[in-house]
Image: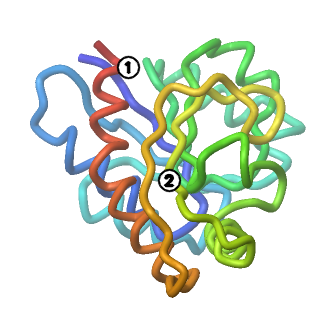
Amino acid sequence: MKRIVIFASGSGTNAENLIKFFHNRENASVIQVLTNNPHAKVLDRAKKLKVSALSFNKIAFTETSDVLNILKAAQPDLIVLAGFLWKFPESILAEFPNKVINIHPALLPKYGGKGMYGMHVHKAIVANNESETGITIHYVNEHYDEGAIIFQTKCKVNATNTAEDVAAKIHELEMEHFPKVVEKLLK
């Protein structure tokens, strides 16, 4: 049985989708959710779905080995960032090489980097009159959104689309493709 640990910072819709997708699967399951936000809705979602969930602070993540030790104890086969906003420490990346992935709400390398997440991305896409956007699932390295690309898929952006319209299209792509890509990586 493959073990998945999810990191999230916000509402946790992608985390919930992954937990539900892998519930009662024989090949993999989500064993833990970790968040840097003690008020994140992802904690409630995990609790309702009976998945262990913990929050941690910046010191535990970047200055001590606390989060690294939690991960070592969990022994994940894959660490999935699903709306997690902090840069991942090199100490964790070194301990879990090619086992940390992220989903980004744009077609990287466009609209990536520090501060480019969620509505910031969608607003930039609309402001720049892009005709298409999409999602990128990629490995995490020491730089924001620069790891090797695993999967991308696109959708059209119409001239009349608002940032909210783009967000809804991206959300659909995430719900459809993210669990399948994670499952494929675990095989």
SS at circle 1:
helix
- Residue visible at 30% across and 19% down? 2
Which is in the foreground here, disc 2 or disc 1?
Answer: 2
- Residue 110 horizontal side relative to residue 23, left or right: right
Q: Check the image and report above or below for 28 versus 106.
A: above
Which of 42 and 126 lies nearest the eye of the viewer?
126
Pinpoint residue 172: horizontal percent, then vertical percent.
33, 62
For the C terminus, the quadrant is: top left
Q: Callout 1, which amino acid?
A: Leu
- Residue visible at 81% across and 49% down? 113
Circle 2: is it few (<14), some (14-19), or many (20+) Cα within 10 Å?
Answer: many
Task: Name the residue tied to disc 2.
Answer: 134
Pinpoint residue 28: horizontal percent, then vertical percent.
24, 25
- Residue visible at 60% across and 61% down? 9
Pinpoint residue 158: horizontal percent, then vertical percent.
48, 76
Q: Callout 2, which amino acid?
A: Gly
Circle 1: is it few (<14), some (14-19), or many (20+) Cα within 10 Å?
Answer: few
Q: Check the image and report above or below for 162 versus 15.
A: below
SS at circle 2:
strand
Task: Name the residue tied to disc 1.
Answer: 185
- Residue visible at 76% across and 55% down? 57
Q: Quadrant of residue 63?
A: top right
Pinpoint residue 92: horizontal percent, then vertical percent.
72, 24
Question: Residue 15: which disc?
Answer: none
